[in-house]
Image (cartoon, grey):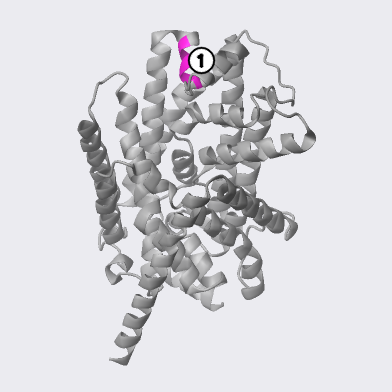
């Protein structure tokens, strides 16, 4: 038994293994399926020159790219099922400072920023039926963050059960709209792979598809998060890869069919008109067309439930990464302690809550959370390539799941992510550069903890 296996065995008694296979699927589905399903289709359409066929192809390709990344993380998680996910893999594959910078970026802005954004978006969606002012929305958002933090403080079992319930509940209205659209939609959409606007050369079409896939990837975001709770999964070596693959494949089918059902309900000229007038929630119009006013209400309910599940999933998953950073010796010591009774990393959970509340109070919240996009993509790329490094560094590590088509799959996925990073930099260079300041600040923190650890050892 090598050192890695011994460490895994020793740590198995720390966390409670209370997340089932369905619980794992619910965590990923809860984070991935948010309100974006109702409006991102418009952005994908615009980026494909208003071609319905190219838009659907982009949704499928977005799911395929996510699946490629997901199976890479599935191998890492199955062979090294430890709390912290990507932070752990980056530590062992490259250097502790790389893992730390990933976790630090998430801790300072990425995790709490995502939580704050979802918490604000949820009551904002309700304003269609319950009028609320800006500060009322913020108060409700803070209440949601505090309430779900308390739920997850009392053990992963409660948070996981809540995730299971919200996952099923959110799929009901989405499923109703999709099924009714597929069965009773009277429009026969033109699914030809030719842009309706702009240049129609082959190179332009490829560029359009790539740009549209980037838009669709926002809807698939979150597939890395199950690895952070790997130690709390039942039979993680089997259930983690299965949960990742089932989640991504199912959500790809869901997104593709949901958008196709919209095309079956709303005539193309009306879709063009709606998007031209910046009315991007095509799912809402499809529901209203199918079921009248009750359809619009159903969409609002679906959006609220979707965001509630995503919010709970983020609050549950992120603290495990900060816990792993502390265990590695480069973060606050209190973050590496589990609650004696509930076996959750309570200190990072509370800190995450406080930072999220502070971010809720900022006005330009969307700009704040977008700063970490570029650096987040950088760490995802490093995580995918870590599969190759793991195999070379730890050849004796048990690998119950192996990436299909290794190493071509890894290289292809890495190149795709690098391409997306380049595309992001070209489209928004200022935000990308500012986003890189976060890990630079993280380097200073890492050096501080290094010096502190050395002083402690000398004493």
Left or right placement of residue 268 versus residue 284 in this view: right
**Image-quadrant location for residue 169:** top left
Q: Position of residue 338 (x, y in %)?
A: 30, 63
Left or right placement of residue 202 versus residue 59 in this view: right
Question: Vertically, is 164 above or below 340?
Answer: above
Give the residue drawn at x 42%, y 49%: 19
Left or right placement of residue 367 versus residue 39 in this view: left
**Image-quadrant location for residue 48:** top right
**Image-quadrant location for residue 411:** bottom right
Give the residue drawn at x 73%, y 61%: 407
Tell which of 351 and 248 is nearer to you. 351
Question: Vertically, is 130 above or below 398?
Answer: above
Residue that carries the numbered disc 1 in the rendered image: 286
Q: Quadrant of the N terminus?
A: bottom right
**Could you tell me if residue 70 is visible in this image?**
no
Q: Residue furthest right?
A: 202
SS assignment for the magenta stretch, majority? helix
Tell which of 355 and 443 is nearer to you. 443
For the residue carrying disc 1, how many other residues have a C-alpha within 10 Å: few (<14), some (14-19), or many (20+)?
many
**Extent of the magenta region:** 282-288
């Amino acid at each position: 038994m090598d050192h890695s296996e011994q460490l895994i065995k020793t740590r198995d008694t720390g966390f409670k293994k209370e997340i089932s296979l369905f619980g794992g699927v619910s965590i990923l589905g809860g984070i991935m399926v948010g309100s974006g399903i109702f409006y991102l289709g418009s952005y994908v359409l615009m980026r494909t020159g208003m071609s319905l066929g190219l838009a659907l192809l982009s949704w499928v390709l977005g799911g395929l790219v996510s699946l490629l990344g997901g199976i890479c993380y599935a191998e890492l998680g199955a062979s090294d099922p430890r709390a912290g996910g990507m932070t752990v893999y980056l530590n062992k594959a490259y250097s502790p400072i790389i893992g730390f910078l990933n976790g630090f970026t998430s801790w300072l802005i990425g995790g709490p920023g995502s939580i704050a954004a979802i918490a604000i978006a949820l009551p904002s969606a309700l304003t269609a039926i319950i009028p609320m002012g800006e500060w009322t929305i913020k108060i409700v958002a803070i209440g949601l963050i505090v309430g779900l933090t308390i739920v997850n403080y009392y053990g992963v079992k409660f948070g996981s059960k809540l995730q299971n319930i919200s996952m099923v509940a959110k799929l009901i209205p989405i499923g109703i709209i999709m099924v009714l659209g597929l069965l009773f939609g009277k429009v026969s959409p033109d699914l030809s792979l030719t842009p309706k606007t702009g240049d129609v050369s082959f190179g332009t079409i490829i560029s359009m598809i790539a740009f549209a896939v980037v838009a669709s990837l926002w809807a698939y975001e979150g597939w890395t998060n199950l690895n952070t709770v790997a130690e709390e999964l039942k039979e993680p070596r089997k259930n983690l890869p299965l949960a990742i693959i089932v989640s991504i494949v199912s959500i790809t089918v869901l997104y593709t069919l949901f958008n196709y059902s919209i095309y079956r309900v709303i005539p193309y000229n009306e879709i063009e008109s709606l998007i031209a007038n910046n009315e991007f929630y095509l799912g809402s119009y499809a529901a209203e067309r199918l079921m009248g006013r009750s359809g619009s209400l159903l969409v609002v309910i679906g959006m609220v439930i979707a965001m509630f599940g995503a919010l709970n999933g983020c609050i549950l998953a992120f603290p495990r990464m900060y816990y792993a950073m502390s265990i590695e010796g480069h973060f606050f010591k209190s973050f590496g302690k589990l609650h004696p009774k509930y076996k959750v990393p309570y200190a990072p959970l509370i800190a995450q809550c406080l930072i999220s509340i502070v971010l809720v109070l900022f006005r330009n919240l969307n700009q704040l959370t977008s700063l970490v996009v570029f650096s987040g993509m950088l760490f995802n790329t490093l995580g995918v390539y870590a599969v190759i490094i793991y195999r070379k560094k730890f050849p004796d590590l048990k690998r119950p799941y192996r990436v299909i088509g290794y190493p071509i799959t890894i290289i292809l996925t890495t190149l795709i992510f690098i391409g997306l990073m380049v595309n992001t930099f070209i489209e928004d260079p200022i935000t990308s550069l500012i986003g890189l300041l976060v890990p630079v600040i993280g380097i200073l923190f890492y050096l501080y903890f290094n010096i502190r650890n050395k002083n402690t050892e000398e004493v």
